[in-house]
Amino acid sequence: MGIVKINDQLHEDIRKASSVMVRSINAQAEYWIKIGMLAEANPGMTFSDIMREQMKQADVEVRKVISG
């Protein structure tokens, strides 16, 4: 494990997002890093595509929610 240097504003954004997403600051940073890496490696995929594929790989069945 190492130390990653980030600027103060990014750290504050991570802190705020982590409280909304109910993650630790480190878990939120790790999540953003992972999604960013996947997005760079798969430029043709949308965020939804990436999340759907990650859920599939984790053997999580995601059902479409229909409102109304």
Image: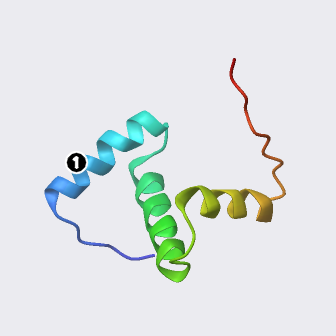
- Quadrant in which the C terminus appears: top right
Most distant residue in the bottom direction: 41
The part of the image, by quadrant, that contains residue 48 is bottom right
In this view, 44 is above or below 50: below
In screen coordinates, is 7 left or right of 38? left
Could you say whether the residue bearing mark 1 is in a helix, strand or loop?
A: helix
Query: Which residue is under mark 1?
Result: 12
Q: Is residue 7 above or below residue 22?
A: below
Residue placed most toward the observer, 59 or 18: 59
Q: Residues within 10 Å of mark 1 (few under 14, many from 20)?
A: few
In which quadrant of the rendered view does residue 4 lie? bottom left
**Which residue appears at 79% of the width and 40% of the height?**
63
| Residue 41 image offset from top left, x and y in percent | 53, 82
Q: Residue at x 39, y 35 (%)?
A: 19
Residue closest to the far left: 8
Which residue: 54% across, 63% down?
A: 46
Residue 55 screen position, x and y as percent: 73, 56
Residue 2 x %, y %: 39, 77
Could you say which is closer to the camera, residue 42 or residue 28?
42
**At x 44% / y 52%, what residue is drawn?**
28
Residue 23 vs 67, above or below: the answer is below
Identity of the amino acid at label 1? Glu
